[in-house]
Image (tube, rainbow, N blue to C red):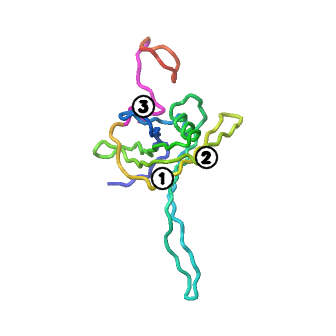
């Protein structure tokens, strides 16, 4: 088996409000441009008469998402609502490269929103969110990834006259 690097464009972050009804699917915050998952150890570093002592301290994990701001996007609203109401958000980091068993590698964690920043650039307004993980993330896999996540920049073949409307808008059958 040849090992391949992970393509950043094949990693998405899903979110879900902790008060979402059981059975509710996680949401893809729209217009993701970047995501970062950081795991850190605090280093214990003390100097003694016998020399330097190093050790591991507390661990922290953080997810940072960068998106184009889209008021009304369900995933982005989960994040801003949690920030406004000091609630928790469930987060999944999902690699869209299928395992041999048909599942997709993922990390899951409960988080709180540390910061939400909107940068009003000349082009699209950018939303940057920092989510502090409570405890540590857990590895796992997801099996039922919606087809639209697997083909984010794609659309299926359609016959002339099959649908009406522009790409991205709700198209009646």
Q: Which mark is residue 148?
A: 3
First of labels 1, 3 by sequence position: 1
Question: Who's the residue at 44% across and 37% down the image?
Answer: 19
Res 89 label: none
Q: Secondary structure at mark 1?
A: loop
Looking at the rendering, which quadrant does residue 80 occupy? top right
**Residue situated in front as seen by the camera: 142 or 167:** 142
Above or below residue 124? Residue 110 is below
Main SS of residues in magenta: loop
At 41% across and 25% down in the image, what residue appears?
156
Q: Is residue 68 magenta?
A: no
The relative height of residue 16 versus residue 169 in the rendered view (above or below) is below
Q: Check disc 2 and report its element: helix, strand or loop.
A: strand
Q: Earlier in the sequence, mark 2 or mark 3?
A: 2
Residue indicated by mark 2: 115
Q: Secondary structure at mark 3?
A: helix
**Along the viewing direction, whichever of 161 and 57 lies nearer the viewer:** 57
In the picture, measured across the screen, residue 92 lies left or right of residue 140, that is: right
**Residue 151 magenta-highlighted:** yes
Comparing 95 with 114, the one in front is 114
Q: Are marks 1 and 3 in contact (CB under 8 Å)?
A: no
Task: Farthest residue to the front: give it.
Answer: 85
Q: Residue furthest bottom?
A: 50
Question: Range of the magenta residues?
Answer: 145-160
Which sits in the foreground, 17 or 129?
17
The residue located at (58%, 44%) in the rendering is 129
């Amino acid at each position: 088996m040849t090992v391949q690097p992970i393509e950043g464009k094949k990693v998405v972050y899903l979110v879900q409000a902790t008060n979402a009804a059981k059975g509710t699917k996680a949401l893809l915050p729209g217009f993701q441009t970047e995501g970062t998952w950081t795991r850190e150890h605090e280093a214990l570093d003390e100097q003694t008469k016998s020399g330097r002592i190093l050790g591991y301290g507390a661990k922290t994990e953080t997810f940072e998402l960068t998106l184009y701001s889209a008021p009304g996007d369900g995933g982005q609203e989960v994040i801003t609502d949690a920030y406004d109401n000091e609630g928790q958000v469930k987060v999944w980091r999902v690699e869209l490269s299928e395992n041999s068993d048909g599942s997709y590698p993922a990390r899951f964690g409960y988080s709180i929103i540390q910061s939400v920043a909107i940068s009003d650039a000349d082009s699209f307004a950018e939303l940057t969110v920092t989510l502090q993980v409570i405890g540590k993330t857990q590895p796992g896999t997801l099996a039922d990834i919606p087809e639209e996540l697997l083909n984010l920049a794609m659309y299926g073949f359609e016959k002339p006259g099959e649908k009406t409307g522009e790409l991205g808008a709700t198209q009646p059958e």
